[in-house]
Image (cartoon, rainbow, N blue to C red):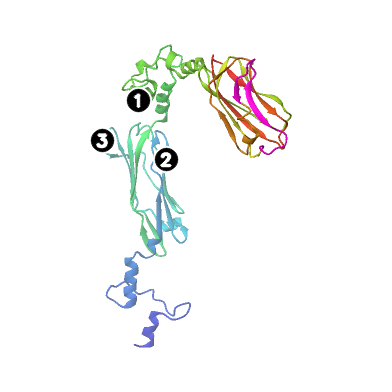
């Protein structure tokens, strides 16, 4: 093979030695012709084309909607308007009414325009051609682009959806509130078996004729709830918490006081912090009791002995229940003297009101 024949394979330089722009595609030809054929078969630079169709949404009568196709070269970005050809474009706007077959809309004349990276049409859904419930179908084909000398064909596209009327939605939803002052006992325009009717009534099928706003409305239910005894209702379990520091003089200190109505105290927990009192110098014990003439003892000096007051120890009492009238108190007594260091203990009482409104205060 002569040197001139070798050079068409390429030389080791920036220009590669020779131009082969005249080589044609031929599956059975020379190496270069076969490479041209492979390149053509793969789509050439036309494969660089990227296409994005605009969204297909519902439209409202009299809306102006832009139907568009974005065109991009994967390497260079938006394809220049001069390289977009819409001279062979075919576009059709069709309408289907009441489920009928689609038929073309010819008025107004539909035409597309182009710009860098874009082919588009702004279309008005005029009342002369459209009504609520119609289906539209916009289709187009025939767009081509030139990318580095290769022709790229844009796929055919279709936009298809329904014509709606936002005012209809307003008119329908107003029935959720439109009879607020109507004087009727139920909103007659709520459709049976709708979600709203099922929320309003316990009847099978959501029969709203059972709904009486004087008793069943949210306001009526709130009024009813307001008459139900609160958590201070008779027999309702309640809790009250307080704290007390054992680093104070030997004496008796108030923990809880019965308020408003008498209560039954059912349980009490005394929890020490992470402080060891069992080896302190002066304190000897604690007790917890009521201030009745004959005190009701919760923790005696044996339970509350200093030896039991270790770090994070919890002393618990679970009855029998103690009747605590209004103004009567549960108290803690420190015997011997103060704890050596700050010892803030948590005290929690569980109780029930004998009469609605009864509580413990601190």
Depth check, mark 3 against mark 1: the one in front is 1
The span from disc 3 to disc 1 (Cα, nearest Å) is 29 Å
Confirm or deny contact between disc 3 and disc 1 (CB under 8 A). no
Query: How far from the left and from the top, in percent, is residue 241?
Result: 60, 27
Density class for disc 3 (Cα within 10 Å; few <14, some 14-19, many ≥20) is few
Residue tagged 1: 194
Query: How far from the left and from the top, in percent, is residue 146?
Result: 40, 60
The stretch drawn in magenta includes residue 284:
yes
Q: Nearer the viewer, residue 148 or 48?
A: 48
The span from disc 2 to disc 3 (Cα, nearest Å) is 23 Å
Secondary structure of residue under mark 2: strand
Image quarter of the C terminus: top right
Image quarter of the N terminus: bottom left
Look at the picture and state if 217 lies above or below 310: above
Query: How far from the left and from the top, in percent, is residue 119?
Result: 41, 50
Q: Nearer the viewer, residue 306 or 193?
A: 306
Look at the picture and state if 126 lies above or below 113: above
The circle on residue 100 is 3
Secondary structure of residue under mark 1: loop
Residue occupying image coordinates x 42% and y 40%: 65
Q: Residue furthest top?
A: 183
Residue occupying image coordinates x 35% and y 74%: 23
Residue tagged 2: 65
Residue occupying image coordinates x 45% and y 54%: 117
Depth check, mark 2 against mark 1: the one in front is 1
Of the residues under marks 2 and 3, which one precedes in the sequence? 2
Of the residues under marks 2 and 1, which one precedes in the sequence? 2
Which segment did they paint magenta?
Answer: 277-299
The circle on residue 72 is none
Q: In the visual, does 256 lie left or right of 189?
A: right
């Amino acid at each position: 093979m002569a040197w001139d024949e070798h050079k068409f394979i390429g030389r080791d330089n920036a220009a590669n030695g020779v131009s082969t722009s005249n080589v044609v595609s031929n599956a059975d030809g020379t190496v270069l012709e076969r490479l041209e054929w492979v390149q053509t078969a793969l789509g050439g630079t036309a494969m660089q084309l990227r296409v994005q169709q605009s969204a297909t949404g519902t439209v409202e009568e009299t809306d102006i909607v832009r139907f568009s196709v974005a065109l991009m070269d994967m390497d260079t970005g938006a394809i220049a308007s001069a390289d977009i050809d819409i001279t062979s474009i075919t576009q059709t706007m069709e309408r289907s009414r009441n489920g009928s077959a689609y038929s073309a809309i010819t008025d107004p004349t539909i035409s597309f325009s182009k710009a860098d990276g874009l082919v588009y049409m702004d279309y008005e859904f005029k009342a002369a051609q459209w009504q609520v419930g119609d289906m539209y179908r916009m289709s187009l084909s025939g767009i081509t682009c030139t990318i580095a000398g290769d022709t790229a064909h844009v796929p055919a596209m279709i936009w298809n959806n329904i014509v709606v009327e936002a005012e209809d939605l307003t008119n329908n939803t107003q029935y959720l509130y439109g009879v607020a002052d109507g004087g009727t006992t139920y909103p007659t325009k709520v459709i049976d078996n709708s979600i709203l009717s099922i929320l309003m009534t316990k009847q099978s099928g959501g029969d709203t004729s059972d709904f009486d706003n004087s008793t069943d409305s949210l306001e009526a239910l709130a009024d009813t709830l307001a008459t139900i005894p609160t958590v201070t209702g008779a027999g309702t379990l309640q809790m009250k918490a307080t704290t007390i520091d054992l680093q104070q003089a030997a004496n008796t200190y108030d923990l809880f006081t019965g308020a408003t109505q008498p209560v039954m105290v059912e349980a009490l927990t005394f929890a020490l912090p992470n402080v060891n009192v069992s080896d302190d110098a002066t304190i000897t014990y604690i007790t917890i009791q009521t201030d009745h003439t004959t005190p009701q003892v919760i923790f005696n000096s044996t339970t509350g002995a200093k030896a039991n007051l270790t770090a994070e120890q919890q002393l618990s009492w679970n009855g029998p229940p103690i009747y605590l009238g209004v103004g009567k108190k549960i108290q803690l007594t420190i015997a011997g003297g103060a704890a050596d260091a700050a010892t803030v203990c948590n005290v929690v009482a569980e109780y029930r009101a004998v009469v609605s409104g009864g509580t413990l205060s601190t």
